[in-house]
Amino acid sequence: MILSALLVSVGINFGLCVIYICLFSILRKLPVHADVYAPRIVAETKNDSTLERLLPSSSWVRMAWLPTEDQLLMRSGLDGFVFMRIYVFSLKVFTFAAVVGLCILLPINYMGSQIYIDFFDFTNESLESFSISNVNDGSKRLWIHFGAVYAFTAFVCYLLYVEFGYIASKRLAFYSSSEPKPNEFTVLVRGIPKSPTDTLSETVEKFFSECYPTLYLSHYMIYNTSKIWKLIDDAEKTYRKLVSLKSTKQSSQRYGRVGCFGLLGPKVDLVEYYENKLEVLEDKVRKQQSLLNGKELRAAFVSFKSRIGAAITLNIQQGQNPTEWLTDPAPEDRDIYWAFFSTSFLTKWIGNVVVVLACTALTILFFIPVIIVQGLTNLYTLEILFPFLKGILNINVVSQVITGYLPSLILKTFLKIAPPVMKFLSSIQSYVSHSQIERSACIKVLWFIIWNVFFANALSGSILYRLNVFLNPKQIPSILAAAVPGQASFFISYVVTSGWTNTASELLRLTPLIFSYIKRIFATESDEEFEVPSLSYAREIPNILLFGLLGITYFFQSPLILPFLLVYFCMGYLVYRHQLLYVYSPKFETGGQFWPIVHHCTVFSLILMQLIAIGIFGLKQLSLASTLTIPLPIITLLFNSYCQKRFSPLFKGYPVELMTKKDKRDENDPTISEFRENLITAYQDPALKPIKFSSTTDSRNAPLLAFET
Amino acid sequence: MILSALLVSVGINFGLCVIYICLFSILRKLPVHADVYAPRIVAETKNDSTLERLLPSSSWVRMAWLPTEDQLLMRSGLDGFVFMRIYVFSLKVFTFAAVVGLCILLPINYMGSQIYIDFFDFTNESLESFSISNVNDGSKRLWIHFGAVYAFTAFVCYLLYVEFGYIASKRLAFYSSSEPKPNEFTVLVRGIPKSPTDTLSETVEKFFSECYPTLYLSHYMIYNTSKIWKLIDDAEKTYRKLVSLKSTKQSSQRYGRVGCFGLLGPKVDLVEYYENKLEVLEDKVRKQQSLLNGKELRAAFVSFKSRIGAAITLNIQQGQNPTEWLTDPAPEDRDIYWAFFSTSFLTKWIGNVVVVLACTALTILFFIPVIIVQGLTNLYTLEILFPFLKGILNINVVSQVITGYLPSLILKTFLKIAPPVMKFLSSIQSYVSHSQIERSACIKVLWFIIWNVFFANALSGSILYRLNVFLNPKQIPSILAAAVPGQASFFISYVVTSGWTNTASELLRLTPLIFSYIKRIFATESDEEFEVPSLSYAREIPNILLFGLLGITYFFQSPLILPFLLVYFCMGYLVYRHQLLYVYSPKFETGGQFWPIVHHCTVFSLILMQLIAIGIFGLKQLSLASTLTIPLPIITLLFNSYCQKRFSPLFKGYPVELMTKKDKRDENDPTISEFRENLITAYQDPALKPIKFSSTTDSRNAPLLAFET
């Protein structure tokens, strides 16, 4: 790619960013957009008149910048805090990288003469003259690159270690200072063995009161309530229609047709019709609820009197058969994913195997459309496919837009489908909480985009043929070294297209804005519940990590990418800080369990960078440097294994020391007996609670005692 | 190799076996050899006169055959029982394999015409005519081999599953029925953090009585006693000399020189000299013991009132820093390896890394002497190296001995050094018990001999060049397929040399027999303590598993190996049953933890066999069969992962269900309070107990209370 094409791409995206940010600055001040730009504030104050005050006219940047880390932690939970630490960490890494890269490596690269450059046509100058490709083969100057690789690795490893420790300490502090929560005392037990004499509930009762006579508190059996969920959904919709009908006082709207989208059938009194329908649905729900009695699944939430009791059940094998009495940490009650409860060991195992296979196949085969798209944006291919475009394509600006901007735009659009698909795959993988699904999907999406963005593009289209590379480990460095540096300009363009513009449009919230307009125009029900959105970690974290990977791998080969990345991370830091403080509210709290993903991905990026370095030094005929780089990935792996042992256990559970401290504090707490009483019903399936839409059925609202074992 | 050379090798070894067994049958009846052939009986009865009765003249085979499995379990513990199950399992596998191989595959191989055979010279016929190499390329008959591979895999997997389950159930039953043991209630804690105010012992006391107020019983700090061990060793030797001197009444022997092996220096009264020396040593020991006071290591044995208390400490992270308060299961008190206690996390981690690297390097580089030896036994090389041997080498019998017998004999001798070296490496790897060292060494030796016997020979000498194979995974099947079948005759010869003869010599116990003669001739001290030997699992299990691997990989290519293997396993079954019942006594009890090694090695053998099958079908131009075999290793790996989840947890600890049952039983046991009192002193370091050699120091024999915290 030539420099001017890159400049066009940067220009377009810079313009887009400016437009987005300006639009945001104007629109956010209008109270009518408060539900788009400050939904959290709206939900928290519940009072429209104060909004004007809460959305001050001073710059949003100050609003995002001013709150301290502790305020952020309080408002967005530890997960939001960890999310922002990714930006902080990346900024530190790439500030160092940019200083070394731009001040030392870039001049050295430019001084080389490996690539012929026409000095009189600067705008068309190849970007390669700034990359390591331009350094002469066998030049002693490559030793500076060698030193940079070592120094950068050492710096990143040091930062990784400090950051892992910092987040671990935050996690422990967060746990120590938090109030007692039901999920700390509860475990999810699956694979309860069937007994010929007892019911499942009795089996659970017997087992735990025998094994934990002093610690066991209660249990709550789980039922398959998917049918009831459907009925409740229907009832809710009907109820909402009814409310909106009643609120419109005009009697003309009370009569209408009910068949086929309100177009067919005789005219009826709609209020009466929906009231009848609601009653029928409620009866159905109650019937289904009573039918479930005695049809428990082989799963239950078991609660204990102390945290240590729950920890024992989680960490020590319970029954004589390891496929029975499987325990998992109970999710927070707001976080449970009720829809899919695979309860036996075998279905869980098979589910996992199938999902892993499906996910691998999807990840590997997705690059086929990517390749086709990449091929299409080649000017020559376009001219052949669409000969009538020849005239337009020959215009300088058009050709530069096509080669500079289009490829990454198309790829970006394709990649949008990955997070929902991966979330779906994770959701059928026997996870029981939204947070676990989000975390598992995050890992899947991460590998998906590393493979499909980095490798598919780095090996530039010929990946199917190059797949053999990964079956021949010895060749990996040299093949990567030959392919990766050439794609620097594409990735710079990707950073500005995908990174800059996405971040700016995140601030503008284009989709919710449009939806909000549509709703205002068409919506009849004004009472519809207002829901504060939450940040999708599975969509955002992999993107940030991909940019980190690009920065780390290109750091010593094409330092030109670094300033673009720094702009991206600065912008992202401000934008997401703003969004976490005023837009998104946390839907769950994992206690910072997303950080190990960041750590491992960074280590992977480092090793990739080192392998490419080994390859490049080899290709550049400096085989001594190539050989001397070989210990580096081994040292990095050892460092990672040490970090793994040093910090990872803290992210899987909590130490006995803290648990007993909290348990002791509870004992002196007068409210603990009330908390324990609530604990017994904390994990009741919402579908089994009595429904309360129809106002005429007060007597039926008594709790269904049969389900409160 | 030609058939006659193989027959020579078989003949020699068969002869050796017959001689060994005959010698054993004669020698074992002499009471004078009782300490070699029935040391357990001698140790158990302590009465020579009954020996005649205890060594009946009926065949030893009956003595080994008759006892039931339960009797074996009682006498040799679960580890001995599991050891014998390896033979039972192998016999089942290879009976099936032999039936299929000899009745179906061998005739098909022989009917082929790929290899030219001279029908008039049967004795010189190449063994290859019985192998798959002789089947014509692309022949439809290869589908029978394909079916055999699938059927054999299914059969072995079925057996593996049944056997894993059987041994797991035995392990649980053994645990349930066993008496309370100190190690069930105790954990080893390492990495105790240093506190500025408290001593280490106080820190431990505080931590555990705070975290486990109801469960904590006591703790015992560990000291670095290697200096004292040396002094005690010296004192013991001196004491033994003194006793032997005193027992010889002749005063002529009481005087002698003491410098330089009794050759230099003036003549002194030896009794007086040694008495003085002993007293000095004892004083030194006492001084060292008192010096240790207050110099605890950062490690302690912590005992609990119940098994569940120990299990909690083992399974849940204790402190806020995962590198502190590291817990490991306490070994049995007889099983502790006191010599090397690495107490901090970092030294442990570094030790592990270093040992893994050393072990890998040793394993990979050991094949260099093997290759040289293999090359030397080539007739042609020998003639060049030793031209004067030309005449002898041309004699038919000599050349057949050299090509048939010598290579495997030399290899066997070389391999003898592997188990002690691996045991040494394991012993510096921060293991704290002999059983863990044995288990870890067993795994190391296993990979060592699989690599150095199977791969080094299969890739026949050119392994350095072929090392590239393992860096190019796609090529593995075809390269193995090209190399492995040709070595069938070498491995048959290896089975008879190493397998048959070793087993027979195990029965004769040649080395202990010779030592026993030497001792009888030269020994002066008759009172020396008589020690019953124990079976070295790290030496024996890898050998059996290697033969299993040979059988499984050669099953469909060269079924001729199978009858030789069957003879080996039958002989081994009888011999080791005899040895476990009458010769070896168990020195520790791991509760069957050796079985997972057997399981994984068998799965590895199956996958190797399947990879070779993929390669051979490809080479034989039956690519459809080759492709259809590819799913087989994947299915086998899935099967293994299922077994892993289904059974492995049972081999790492014991389920809560059983622990609480045993704890409850203890509560009703009147002796439990006495047991708990003993528990407090169960883990005292023998080096810190008062020494009691010199008879004059009765008053000093009082226990050193300072060390009984």
Image (spheres, coloured by chain):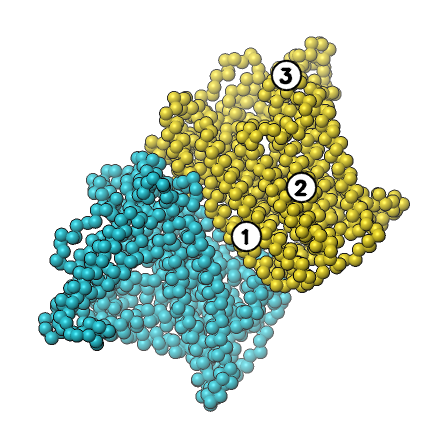
Chain colours: A cyan, B yellow
Q: Earlier in the sequence, mark 1 or mark 3?
A: 3
Seen in the picture, residue B40 relative to B365 is either above or below; the reply is above
Q: Is A526 situated left or right of B60 in this image? A: left
Mark carried by residue A134: none
What type is the residue that disc 2 sits on?
Leu
Q: What element does badge 3 sit on?
A: helix
Q: CA distance from mark 1 to mark 3?
A: 54 Å
Amino acid type at image mark 3: Thr
Residue A92 visible in the current orientation: no
Q: Residue at x 32, y 51 (%)?
A: A331
Residue that numbered label 1 is attached to? B636
> Mark 3 and mark 2 in contact (Cβ < 8 Å)?
no
Q: Position of residue B107 (x, y in %)?
A: 71, 52
What residue sits 69% from the left and 19% below the top? B31
* Residue at 61% over, 34% down: B536
Looking at the rendered structure, the kind of residue marked 1 is Thr
Q: Are marks 1 and 3 in contact (CB under 8 Å)?
A: no
> Which chain contains the residue that carries disc 1?
B
Q: Chain of mark 3?
A: B
Disc 3 crowd rating (10 Å Cα; few below 14, some 14-19, many 20+) is few
User: Contact (CB < 8 A) between labels 1 and 2?
Assistant: no
Q: Residue at x 13, y 58 (%)?
A: A695
Q: Position of residue A314 (x, y in %)?
A: 38, 44
Q: Nearer the viewer, residue A499 or A315?
A: A315
Residue B527 vs A665, above or below: the answer is above
- Mark 2, mark 3: which one is toward the viewer? 2
Quarter of the image for the C terminus of chain A: give it: top left
Same chain assignment for discs 2 and 3? yes
Q: Which mark is residue B566?
A: 2
